[in-house]
Amino acid sequence: MSFNALKEKGMPLEKQLRNWHQIAGKPYNKTDVDCYTRTRQILMNGIEVEAWNFHHTLGRLCPDIEDSKLIAQVCRIEDEQQTTINWMAPADQSVLETTLGYEQVAVDLTAWLAQNEPDDYVKETFDFGLLEDFDHLYRYSQWAYMMEGIKPNEIVQGQTDVILGRPTQNHHNCNALRRRKHYDKQTASPQTKVNILTLVSGEQQTHNYYAEHGFTYGNHVLRETYSEIKDVEEEHVTMYESLIDPTESLFEKLLVHEFTEVCNYYTCVEDETNEKIKKIWEMFLDFELGHLKIASELFKKYEKRDPEEVIGENIVIPCRFKSQKEYVTKILTSEIDKRLGTNMDYTKINKLPEDWASYKVQSAQAELGSPTENTIRIAALHNTRDIVEADEALKSRQVALLEKGLEKEALAEDTVMPDELQEMIDDYEEIKDKKEKMTK
Ligand SMILES: [Fe+2]
Ligand SMILES: [Fe+2]
Ligand SMILES: [Fe+2]
Ligand SMILES: [Fe+2]
């Protein structure tokens, strides 16, 4: 594939203003939307939120009045793009339905990025985070069923497995341990830069969504569950953003931001099946090529370097949404017991030192129990066992996975232990047999 974004004309900024009808747009229909149209919509909203935030930071720090005026104009367009994209979601899509969409984004996006990441350390970090969002999807799926009678496949459409991952109560770390080694701006590939910024944007928006919506349910345990998982998303932002070289100048960062937007819209245009939404991706790709032109002129002015040194000559593909069940199962079965090491590395549960800094965090936060563990106990009251959607081979390994993935230290009092989970599964099978006999 050959598409040099720097050589494209793009739409001039003065033509990017739209009217309110165009900005507010029309929502998709939640009953017939493809799950990967929804994941693109969720991700691109996050990309635009990050673009808007970054332009404001840049505007606040830019000493040149004329340049700051130009940045302010781009900033408004980023904001209008964000409205159009976020408001594609229909009013009748519940917070929990949207939440399952957010975690499907995290799982299938992170799995794609991990397999298309040239830097081994960055890939390992993606794989590490993947198993945490995978567990979030499973915990929230219990609530979608209990509160609204929604089976997870109504949202993920059979493309993403729903089963436990690294248990959420074990995701809480000392934030200092979450910090990773950053890439070197001189040698990192454009793919690495775009991959990381794409994921940071997605995770940041996931955090923001839970922060802004977790309180909208009256159920106290569900509120606590949102607060517990939101805290992990905060750690994910810390972890992924720490991979970025902090010595990149602001205008180098601007260039990477606009290029990341271009690459994501380019991928959306290639993959979109909804014709109306595809037209919006095409228009916004054109907008972003215009922004990239402005960013590269500012970069040349301040850095006196060629933008190609930073973003290369070719487009990269950061968000190809497709089913990743096979890859996720592979990482799940081999890395569920992985933990953050003390030297910005990774280790396994059985190699953790007694004074591992995250134990303190976990004990303090779970002093009165872990809401995501309580979630499974409450799900068993509703349904005899937890809600799981995965193929039989993976399901049959669930108890063994829990055994392998659960830390023995700092356990919450309400932890569902492997033998209890086995009991729930056995009871469920027994009741299922009885019900089947009754209907014969
Ligand atoms: Fe944008
Ligand atoms: Fe998550
Ligand atoms: Fe996450
Ligand atoms: Fe932009």
Image: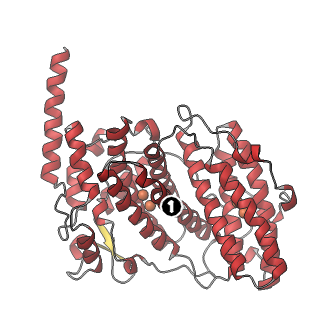
Query: Above or below — where is 100 with respect to 309?
Result: above
Q: Position of residue 112 (x, y in %)?
A: 51, 56
Q: Is residue 66 left or right of residue 254?
A: right
Task: Tell me the residue at 65%/49% (across/down).
Answer: 85
- SS for callout 1: helix
Whether residue 389 is visible: no
Q: Nearer the viewer, residue 140 or 110?
A: 140
Q: Is residue 303 left or right of residue 175?
A: right
Ligand 2: quadrant of the figure: bottom left
Query: Which image quarter: residue 427?
Result: top left
Query: Above or below — where is 429 with respect to 257?
Result: above
**Where the C terminus falls, by quadrant?**
top left
Q: Position of residue 249 (x, y in %)?
A: 67, 83
Q: Position of residue 90 (x, y in %)?
A: 57, 39
Task: Tell me the residue at 39%/48% (across/down).
Answer: 217
Query: Which image quarter: residue 245?
Result: bottom right
Q: How many marks?
A: 1
Q: For the residue carrying disc 1, how many other residues have a C-alpha within 10 Å: few (<14), some (14-19), or many (20+)?
A: some
Which residue is tagged 1?
A: 208
Q: Residue furthest top?
A: 440
Task: Tell me the residue at 64%/38% (across/down).
Answer: 273
Whether residue 138 is visible: yes
Q: Is residue 101 left or right of residue 85?
A: left
Query: Above or below — where is 307 with respect to 13?
Result: below
